[in-house]
Every structure is written in structure tokens, then in C-alpha cells.
Image (cartoon, coloured by chain):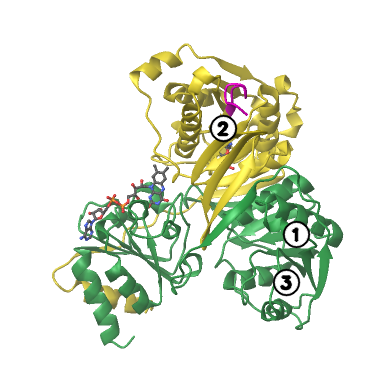
């Protein structure tokens, strides 16, 4: 298929607004959910956005009709993750927000995001980060692929797209412990990317100005046809029962090498019965 | 009695330590039945039998392994339906988590990852926020899917040894799936695996391209070699050696951090280690805040001296 006649690619990038790991992070409240203060666009989702921008640019960019949409689900403040994505280069944004979403586990999150992607789509390609830096489960991308019946390519360390007779084909590499795999899928597909895939760009002045004119669609659960009891704590299939901060590690002994530090290290290890 | 389905991916020549741990944990919760993604040798099946396992389920078609994850999830879903299993235990690799994730959607069952402890009542314990929180949680659906970290339970053989019966399970492969088109094996190091190692010596940018002194110390201690992202990004060592937020999470008995500053993303992967030793020439490095024993010094003099001393003491 000729790229011009193929029609523009519609790429969705899932970006999450997460507590900044540079500060202390907390779990609190009666429902033991994440305290959402000092939050940022998840660093790991910047790699997904960069991958989207590079793929689209490699095939003619906006002029060829391609479009990158940044999508987030979260409280009112989470729109900041979409705004930042628009500054970096996404074309438009979608923000799903609803009180009832609070406390959603991976199953409820993927249910809502699947409905959202159906509503805002169809998309040719859905890109996500390898894990959210707060949830850290990596469950959401796989569950989305299952719910949307899309080919799943996860933990991609490289990603290419090629137009062909019967549509686009993507190829990716992923690294396992003992082997590296090459993977192929035809679009539409869902891909999660690792931090090995690229070097994310920063927003520049032009991007920040341009973002002001870009559109963000704000949706509620009712808009996308999801009932309130299908998400949040009620709609989740797991429950947190207790959460306690781990006592911080106390600082031990620090010595300065005066020529015998290697021997003193062995003494320490022997004392701890670690030899 | 609850049936516990233990999924063992990538059967090797014999049972790996983490696989024995899963089977032990399963046996403590109910009657264990096993699902294997592919063929296994007799020695491996005998190992499975030593846990009293009666049945080993395998997919009727080998094609489940040719498509990424989706095929294995379909196989497991069918196996759970046939065995009536109430608990599914998997390892904690990325792939195992994804198989668990998709299985959860298929069975409408909750999934908990990174489990480090599980009581008889199925209350699961895990770490959150890079090891700064301990969280207890529970699956609220009829079937519970749990991915368990290695080194979390003691592997003890249970029940009377058996010769498990092989059961072939028909699998309908998903139409829309990504295909694996090639696989290249990586060189093997001969050292223990990071996830299972008792001792890890990890190096960062300070190693400046030379992991030799770290490998010598690791070998003297029977340990594994790990790295910070700065060291793997520089190409000094395999990416699979990376420890941290986007690498491996480890909790060995002893973690020796060498020429690593201790960024938050690095700490995320190692701060639940039992004992932490740090060697860094900058006294202000944040890694010293979490070290039980810190040495301000040059790694190229401290490490060889320590390795010599261990050898001299005949340890
Ligand atoms: C999204 C994201 C994910 C990341 N994931 C990870 C991850 O999984 N794992 C990870 O490690 N990092 C990760 N990082 C990177 C992390 O932020 C740090 O940049 C990285 O850990 C720094 O590596 P380092 O400590 O080896 O290097 P540096 O910070 O440069 O520290 C080198 C240290 O070596 C010391 N040194 C130099 N020479 C000597 C010598 N001769 N003897 C003794 N000491 C010496 C120096 O004093 C210094 O403290 C991630 C970053 C991002 C943004
Ligand atoms: N609330 C959310 N909004 C947008 N994207 C999300 C959300 N939760 C998870 N994701 C996406 O799913 C990826 C993996 O998240 P997780 O499964 O929580 O580790 C993230 O990197 C995001 O791309």
C-alpha cells in the first residue's frame, strides 16, 4: 500500500500522571490509595511518546495525515501529563476523569482505558510505557491487548513500521535474560516500550506555544459507556488490606580507605557471616 | 482441597530453584497440578514428580510459543477451566506477569504481581514504591492469579514422589497476535542468576569499562555481577545485568555496590537487600545513606585487596 493512499496513521500514547519519585511517596486514606501530590508525567511514558513521534516523523509526519493522541486516565490534575505531551509534540489529547475511577486496580484501569480507546479511536497503534512508575505492575498493556484483541508487542527495545500491500507491519526487538527476540505484527497493534528504545526529547519554546492551541477532550465514564461500579475499588479484582512504610535503612559505618579498606571489608563480611 | 495450577515456562534440563520454590508454595496451599508451555525432558518431569504432582498439562500445539504471550494465556485459561484450579502461581518475569495479566482478563480473575509472601488465607505481601512500602493485598475473585518473586519461599519437597501423567490441552490461538520471527541466544556467564544469587557485586560508571576486579570478587564470593544503567548503557556489560527501576529488582543476602552513585532508580532495584556494602570515592554519594558498610576509596585498590584477602584466608 502506498503511504499516501494508506490514509494517516492514528497513534494513541497512554501517559500516566504519577507521584514524582524524587520525593517521598505515600499510600494513605481509608481506601489505601496512592497520595497524588507532586506528580509528573511518568518518565517511562516519555519513551512511548518519543517512539510515537519518531515513527510518525519517519513516515511523513502530520503532512501525511498522521496524528499522535496523548491519552490519560486520572483525577483533574492528571491533565498535566497530557499537556506536557502536547508540548513535547503530540497533536491532541484525551483525559478520562471521574470520581468513580479512584482506587482502580490494573483490571479496572484496563477496562476503562479499553473503553476509552474504543470511544476515541479507532487507532492503528497504541503505545504505552513498560510500567507505570507508581503501580509498577506492567499489567495494563497486556490486559488492554487482551481486551481489545490486539497483537501485543511488549518491552520493545526497538520499533519500526513498514507500509505494505495489505497494511502496515511493525517489527520490534525485545531482550530477555537469555535471548533476544525479533517480533512482527500487523497493525492495529499495541506496543509497550522500554527505556532502551530512544532518548526522549524535551519540550522547546515553540512546542510550548503550539501546545496552547491543541485540543484536549475531557470525558467521563458516562461518555464512554462504562458503569461506575465497573471501576474503582468496587470494580477491581484485588484489594489492598494494609500498607506500611518500610522503616528507612539506617546508615551503617562509613570508613575512608587508608590502605587497608579491602581487609576491613573482609573483616566486616566475616563478622556478618557472609563469607 | 483447592487445586493449585503452577505454570512453568521454558523447561530447562532440570527444575530451576525458582521453579522448586513455586511448587513448594503450591503444595502448601493445595493440590498442585502443573502447566508446561512446551516439551520437557524426563529428568525435569521427575523433578516435578518429586513434589507429588499427578498431572502435567501441555498445549496440544507447539504454536503457542510462536506468538507472543497470547497463546500461553489461552492455554492456561483452558487448563484452569479443565482442572477447576482456584489458584494460579507463576514466576515473576516480565513475560510471566503478562501471561498472568491476560489470563486475568480471560477468567475475570484478579492478578497480584511481585508477591514475596503468601499466607494460607491467600493474603499476599509485596513491596511498593521501589521498596519503600510493604503492602498486603488480596484477590477478591474466585480464581486468584499470583506471580511470585524468586527467593521468597523455601523450596521443600512435599508429598509422595509420583510419575506425573501428561495431559494434552487443546488451545484455540488468538487470531490477532504478534509473531516471534527470530531468537538469538545470549552468551552464558557461568555465574549464578541475578534473581537467585546470594551475593551480587554491582558496578557503575566508576568502573570505567573494566569489570575485571568485580568479576574476581564475585567469583571469590560465589556471586553474580550486576550493573547500573550507566554501565549497561555504555555497553560495558549486557543489558540483562542492569539492576534498578527498569532493570532487575534483587534482594540478595549481600549487595556490594561499586562505583555507583545510588540514584533513586538504582536504589529501586536493590534497597531490600539484606546487607549493603558500598565502595565509592566520593564521600557525598547518596549510596552511603543506605549502606551498612561504606568505604570511601578507589575501587581499583579496594576490590583486589579484598579478593586477595578472601583467597588468603582460604574462604
Ligand atoms: C526512566 C529512568 C530509568 C532508569 N532506570 C535505571 C535503572 O534501572 N538502574 C540504574 O542503575 N539506573 C537507572 N536510571 C539512571 C539513574 O538515574 C542514574 O543515572 C544511574 O543509576 C547512574 O549510574 P552510576 O551510579 O553508575 O553513575 P554515576 O551517577 O555517574 O556515578 C558513578 C559513581 O562512581 C564513583 N566513582 C568513579 N570512579 C570511581 C573509582 N575509581 N572508585 C570508586 N568510585 C568511583 C563516582 O564517585 C560516582 O559516585 C534510570 C533513569 C531514568 C530516567
Ligand atoms: N491511568 C493511566 N492513564 C494512562 N495510561 C496508563 C494508566 N495506567 C497505566 N497506563 C499505561 O500503562 C503502562 C503500564 O502501566 P502499569 O501496568 O500500571 O505498570 C504505563 O506506562 C502507561 O502507558
Residue A10 included in the magenta stretch of the image: yes
Q: Give the image location of residue A155, x and y in percent.
A: 54, 47
Look at the image and give the residue range highlighted in magenta.
A1-11
Q: Which mark is residue B48?
A: none
Asked if the residues shown at circle 3 and circle 1 are in contact, with their CB atoms under 8 angstroms apart, the answer is no
Q: Which residue is mark 3?
A: B27
**Lateral position of residue B288 relative to residue B227, left or right:** left
Chain of the residue under label 3: B
Question: In 3D space, how far apart are the residues under numbered discs 3 and 1 (Cα atoms)?
Answer: 11 Å
Viewer-closest of A140 and A76: A140
Report the residue at 76% width, 27% height from top: A227
Chain letter, colour green? B
The local secondary structure at tag 3 comes to helix
Where the N terminus of chain B falls, by quadrant?
Answer: bottom right
Q: Which mark is residue A14?
A: 2
Decide: few, some or many residues near mark 1? Use Cα within 10 Å; few <14, some 14-19, many ≥20: many
* Discs 2 and 1 carry the same chain letter: no
Asked if the residues shown at circle 2 and circle 1 are in contact, with their CB atoms under 8 angstroms apart, the answer is no
Q: Which residue is mark 1?
A: B87
Does residue B123 show up?
no
Chain of the residue under label 2: A
**Lateral position of residue A187 relative to residue B33, left or right:** left
Report the residue at 64% width, 26% height from top: A99
Q: Is mark 2 within 8 Å of ligand 2?
A: yes
Name the main secondary structure of what is drawn in magenta.
loop
Q: Give the image location of residue B33, x and y in percent.
A: 77, 68
- Choose mark 2 or mark 3, whichever is in front: 2
Residue B13 included in the magenta stretch of the image: no
Amino acid at each position: 500500500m502506498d503511504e499516501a493512499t494508506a490514509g494517516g496513521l492514528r497513534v494513541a500514547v497512554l501517559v500516566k500522571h504519577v507521584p514524582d519519585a524524587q520525593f517521598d511517596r505515600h499510600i494513605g486514606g481509608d481506601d489505601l490509595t496512592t497520595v497524588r501530590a507532586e506528580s509528573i508525567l511518568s518518565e517511562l511514558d516519555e519513551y512511548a511518546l518519543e517512539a510515537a513521534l519518531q515513527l510518525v516523523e519517519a513516515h511523513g509526519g502530520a503532512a501525511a495525515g498522521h496524528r499522535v493522541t496523548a491519552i490519560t486516565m486520572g483525577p483533574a490534575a492528571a491533565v498535566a501529563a497530557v499537556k506536557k505531551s502536547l508540548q513535547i509534540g503530540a497533536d491532541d489529547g484525551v483525559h478520562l476523569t471521574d470520581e468513580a475511577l479512584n482506587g482502580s486496580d490494573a483490571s479496572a484501569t484496563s477496562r476503562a482505558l479499553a473503553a476509552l480507546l474504543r470511544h476515541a479511536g479507532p487507532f492503528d497503534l497504541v503505545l504505552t510505557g513498560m510500567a507505570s512508575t507508581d503501580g509498577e505492575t506492567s499489567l495494563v498493556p497486556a490486559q488492554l491487548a487482551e481486551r481489545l484483541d490486539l497483537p501485543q508487542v511488549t518491552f520493545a527495545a526497538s520499533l519500526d513500521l513498514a507500509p505494505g500491500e495489505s497494511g502496515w507491519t511493525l517489527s520490534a526487538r525485545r531482550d530477555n535474560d537469555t535471548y533476544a527476540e525479533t517480533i512482527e505484527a500487523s497493525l492495529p497493534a499495541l506496543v509497550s516500550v522500554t527505556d532502551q528504545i530512544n532518548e526522549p526529547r524535551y519540550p522547546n519554546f515553540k512546542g510550548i506555544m503550539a501546545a496552547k492551541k491543541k485540543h484536549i477532550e475531557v470525558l467521563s465514564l458516562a461518555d464512554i459507556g462504562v458503569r461506575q461500579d465497573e471501576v474503582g475499588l468496587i470494580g477491581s479484582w484485588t484489594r489492598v488490606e494494609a500498607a506500611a512504610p518500610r522503616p528507612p535503612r539506617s546508615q551503617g559505618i562509613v570508613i575512608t580507605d587508608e590502605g587497608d579498606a579491602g581487609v576491613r571489608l573482609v573483616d566486616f563480611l566475616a563478622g556478618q557471616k557472609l563469607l | 482441597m483447592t487445586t493449585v495450577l503452577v505454570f512453568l515456562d521454558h523447561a530447562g534440563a532440570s527444575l530451576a530453584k525458582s521453579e522448586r520454590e513455586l511448587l513448594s508454595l503450591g503444595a502448601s496451599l493445595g493440590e498442585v497440578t502443573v502447566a508446561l508451555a512446551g516439551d520437557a525432558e524426563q529428568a525435569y518431569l521427575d523433578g516435578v514428580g518429586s513434589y507429588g504432582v499427578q498431572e502435567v498439562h501441555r498445549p496440544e500445539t507447539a504454536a503457542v510459543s510462536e506468538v507472543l504471550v497470547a497463546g500461553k494465556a489461552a492455554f492456561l485459561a483452558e487448563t484452569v477451566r479443565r482442572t477447576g484450579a482456584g489458584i494460579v502461581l507463576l514466576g515473576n518475569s516480565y513475560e510471566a506477569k503478562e501471561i498472568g495479566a491476560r489470563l486475568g482478563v480471560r477468567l475475570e480473575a484478579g492478578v497480584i504481581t511481585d508477591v514475596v509472601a503468601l499466607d494460607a488465607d491467600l493474603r499476599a505481601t509485596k513491596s511498593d514504591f521501589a521498596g519503600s512500602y510493604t503492602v498486603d493485598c488480596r484477590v477478591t475473585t474466585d480464581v486468584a492469579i499470583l506471580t511470585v518473586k524468586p527467593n521468597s519461599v523455601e523450596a521443600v519437597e512435599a508429598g509422595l514422589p509420583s510419575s506425573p501423567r501428561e495431559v494434552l490441552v487443546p488451545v484455540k490461538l488468538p487470531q490477532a497476535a504478534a509473531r516471534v520471527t527470530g531468537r538469538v541466544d545470549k552468551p552464558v556467564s557461568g555465574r549464578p542468576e541475578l534473581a537467585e544469587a546470594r551475593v551480587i557485586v554491582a558496578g557503575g560508571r566508576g568502573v570505567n569499562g573494566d569489570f575485571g576486579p568485580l568479576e574476581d570478587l564475585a567469583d571469590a564470593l560465589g556471586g553474580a555481577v550486576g550493573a547500573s544503567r550507566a554501565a549497561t548503557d555504555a555497553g560495558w556489560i549486557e543489558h540483562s545485568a542492569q539492576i534498578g527501576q527498569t532493570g532487575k529488582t534483587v534482594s540478595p543476602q549481600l549487595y556490594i555496590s561499586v562505583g555507583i552513585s545510588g540514584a533513586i532508580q538504582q536504589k529501586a532495584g536493590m534497597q531490600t537487600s539484606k546487607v549493603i556494602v558500598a565502595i565509592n570515592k566520593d564521600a557525598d554519594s547518596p549510596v552511603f545513606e543506605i549502606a551498612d558498610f561504606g568505604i570511601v576509596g578507589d575501587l581499583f585498590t579496594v576490590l583486589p585487596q579484598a579478593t586477595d584477602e578472601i583467597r588468603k584466608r582460604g574462604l
